[in-house]
Image (cartoon, helix red, strand yellow):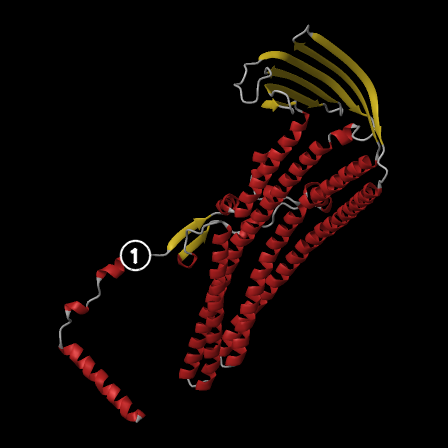
Amino acid sequence: MHLFNSNMLLALLMWAVGEAGARPVVPELMVDPQPAMATDATAPAVLRLSIQDALQGALTRAVVIQTQQLDVEQQQLQTEQARHEFLPQAVLSSQWERERTSATGAAATRGAIASGNLLSTWKLRSGTQLSLSEGRQYNRDGQAVPMAGPDATGTPNNNSRTSSLSLTQPLLRGAGGDVVLLNEHRAALALESARKGFLQTQRDVVLGGVVAYFGLEQAQQNVALAQAALKRAAEARSINEELLAAGRISRIALLQSDADAAQTELALMQSRQAENVARRQLLRVIGRYDLDADRTAVTLADSFISYLPMPSQGVGAAMQAALARRVDLELAADAVKAGQFGVIEADDGLRNQLDFYVRRDQSSDNGAGPTTRRSNIAVGLNYSIPLDKSAARVASSAARIALRKAELSRADLKRNARAEVSDALKNIEFAALQYRMAQRTAELARQRLAAEIEKTRAGRSSATDLSLAQDALNQTLSQETQAHFAIFMAQLELQRVSGTVLEQWHVASLAQDTGLPP
């Protein structure tokens, strides 16, 4: 049944080929030119990209940069709001009411009262609080009328005016510049921490952009190595074909060459896939979502080789830079300051309340009779003792524990920073040594392959030995490339742990817009 179907299919194909050769091409079967125009419209794009363009694109388009910049701006507003505590505050209030008074067996009376009051307070940075109040009240009393009678028109018969000026100075709780300015200091510290965090985010984005940019170059180099390996496999197969034609090897020896070519083609396919992944990653990092990553050829204008060796740093200089510029250490120091502020606030909560005050009151009444004026000056002390301070003691203990934890964390970060800088410097030395060894190994592998090729041509080597020599060269070349790139990555790690990423790559900090020095 299968043989019948195969013969029938073959006959139909031969008949179709004969008919196609005998008949002219029908115009309706020709390819429409419109799809060709669409193909040209979707031709692969070419993007030439330098490292500076990539880094600026990453900083400009990174969402984390934009959101954190908004956080810094919001913190600036909160810091400015904290300063309003020491600006004069004023409240103006007014009231108007109409009242009706009645009693059993008496006529009802109606009246209206209008009042206005202005209260102004001003807190000084010494803790002294000034208060000024000014109030006026107008009373219009109506005449007594029957309940069912018409309203009588009243006449103003009582106007009063009061004013008060007071000064209050806390002597225990709430006294002292460290307590009075606590909110302002906390807001300024929060703003400084936000700016430092913003700077660290920029460093992370720049470092990620550098790794993505030169990671694509590394992937492209791996593709070139795989292509060169495939070319060597093809040359080895041609040598074996010549030996087979000369009768010096058997046909089965070509199987090794075919296996090598298949393995090399697989390695090339994997390298191209890795290149596609690296290209997509780079376009995402720089925020070029408008480009189709699979149809965009990225040409890199810079190579990491041109940045080797980078400006070297001694152990002392790198350590000093790390301790002075690392944001995590600065944030840890800010955490210690915040803990100190918490202790100050908790200790202030344990104090008793003792306030010294001076007050001057004035009032005047202008009624039906003569105007009366009164004035009063008072000086005194106000003292209060909370009988239960258990909550304040717990808060004070918690604040001291938090401060101690912040100090321990800061000390641990310092030790880790020193260790990371030391490890980074040692990794650079090891990577350089590894690269020199990889270069030497690759050179020996080249010599071995050349020798195996000569021996194979002379009939003194086998296809297996030639295949092993090719594999050794492919492996050593890959190791050489990886070792070269490892030096670059080790230097990037030193930049990260020493906080010099922006300076090394000549990128201006966006934190300048928020008042943070670069």
SS of the residue under disc 1: helix
Q: Is residue 119 left or right of residue 349?
A: left
Residue found farthest to the bottom: 1
Q: Is residue 277 visible?
A: yes
- Residue 442: x and y in percent read 57, 65
- Which quadrant of the structure image shows residue 513? top right
Q: Is residue 364 left or right of residue 476?
A: right
Residue found farthest to the front: 105
Q: Quadrant of the N terminus?
A: bottom left
As rendered, which of 108 and 229 lies closer to the eye? 108
Q: Quadrant of the C terminus?
A: top right
- Residue 439: x and y in percent read 59, 62
Q: Height in image: 457 above or below 102?
A: below
Q: Residue at x 72, y 17 (%)?
A: 165
- Name the amino acid type tagged 1: Asp
Residue found farthest to the left: 23
- Residue 292: x and y in percent read 41, 56
As rendered, which of 88 and 325 lies closer to the eye? 88
- Which quadrant of the structure image shows residue 317? top right
Residue found farthest to the top: 370
Question: Badge 1 is on which residue?
Answer: 40
Q: Residue at x 19, y 83 (%)?
A: 15
Q: Height in image: 173 above or below 356?
A: below
Q: Is residue 461 visible?
A: no
Q: Height in image: 334 above or below 419?
A: above
- Residue 94: x and y in percent read 60, 22
Are there few (<14), some (14-19), or many (20+) residues within 10 Å of tag 1?
A: few
As rendered, which of 502 and 286 lies closer to the eye? 286
Q: Height in image: 172 above or below 199?
A: above
